[in-house]
Image (cartoon, grey):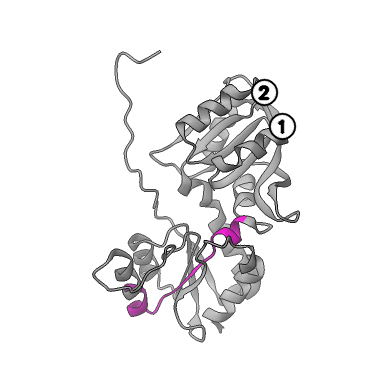
Amino acid sequence: MSTVGRVVAALEAAYPPELAESWDAIGLVCGDPIEDVRRVLFCVDPTESTVDEAMEIGAQMIVAHHPLLLRGVHGVPANTPKGSLVHKLIRAGIALYCAHTNADSAFPGVSDALAQAIGLSVLAPLSPKEPPLGLGRIGELPEPEPLETFVQRVADALPETAWGVRAAGDPQRPIRTVAVCGGSGDSLLAEATAAGVDAYVTADLRHHVSGEHIDSAPDAPALVDVSHWASEWPWCDQAAGVVRAAFGGNVETHTSIRRTDPWTLRAARTGRTAR
């Protein structure tokens, strides 16, 4: 029988804690390392919805990408949103482990999973620590395709969200080389430009930063902006594969089917539009 501690060890071999940024909060949030584990749920966000999902499938452990307690706390009383989740997890006997920026920089990591989902062959990290480690990835499509076709490729590869997929650039621009960064990636725009790629896929791109980027040079990479949650969701299957490889049939792995992206509605104005 596998245990919480053994599952954590397998995950930390794949996503070494020393790769995490200094501000991050990774590791075992709650749970006893000696407790048995037969079923694990993998998700992006540790929320009430995913905790409920873990309870419904009878999981003894949740592996999440985002930390539950990223900022320092002095207590977890049950009458606070995050404290109530900690109490719920403990009462249900469910351990919670979080792999965040260590999974971002690992190889393979979060951006490798995003690149694979889109159909890219990974060539190198976008912001290397010590290759092949580092943030983001540079990849290549089998054949060039117009930006509008590539944007549809991205939309078809990721789970649907109200945010959708949007792009900045000439719809007919040929796209072959692509940089990707799971999660918020506008801090790596300069690296994507320096890499000379045709397009950059990431999440949470801001108005002014994106506009200045597109105006900076005629050959600046086209931008493809997706939901933060959707950009990191492919990692769940990758992490589940780590556990399957370590424990085989002794541990069942489940990727969460709950959409924890915070945006739930999208509307477009009917009639006259701005030009």
User: Which residue is drawn at the image coordinates 66% and 26% (left, top)?
Assistant: 145
Q: Position of residue 237 (x, y in %)?
A: 56, 58
In this view, which residue lies farthest toward the left? 79
Q: Earlier in the sequence, mark 1 or mark 2?
A: 1
Q: Position of residue 161 (x, y in %)?
A: 41, 42
Where 157 sits versus 222, above or below? Answer: below
Q: Position of residue 54 (x, y in %)?
A: 40, 68
User: Which residue is drawn at the image coordinates 34% and 15% (left, top)?
Assistant: 273
> In the depicted view, which residue is nearer to us: 144 or 21?
21
> Around disc 1, counting alpha carbons within 10 Å, would you say few (fewer than 14), some (14 to 19), or many (20 or more)?
some
Name the residue beneath numbered marker 2: 219
Residue type at mark 2 is Asp
> In the depicted view, which residue is nearer to us: 248 or 3?
3
User: In terms of secondary structure, where does tag 2 sit?
Assistant: loop
User: Which residue is drawn at the image coordinates 47% and 46% (left, top)?
Assistant: 228
Where 52 sits versus 132, above or below? Answer: below
Tell me if residue 7 can be seen.
yes
Question: Which quadrant of the view contains residue 95?
Answer: bottom left
On screen, residue 59 versus residue 147, left or right, reads left
> In the depicted view, which residue is nearer to us: 161 or 14?
14
Q: Where is the N terminus found, in terms of image quarters?
A: bottom right
Residue type at mark 1 is Gly
Give the distance between the C-alpha atoms of the residues marked 1 and 2, in whole angstroms.
8 Å
User: What residue span does the magenta drawing correspond to?
Assistant: 88-104
Name the residue beneath numbered marker 1: 196
Where 169 sits versus 7, above or below? Answer: above
Whether the magenta-drawn stretch holds residue 255 is answered as no
Question: Which quadrant of the view contains residue 8?
Answer: bottom right
Q: Are marks 1 and 2 in contact (CB under 8 Å)?
A: yes
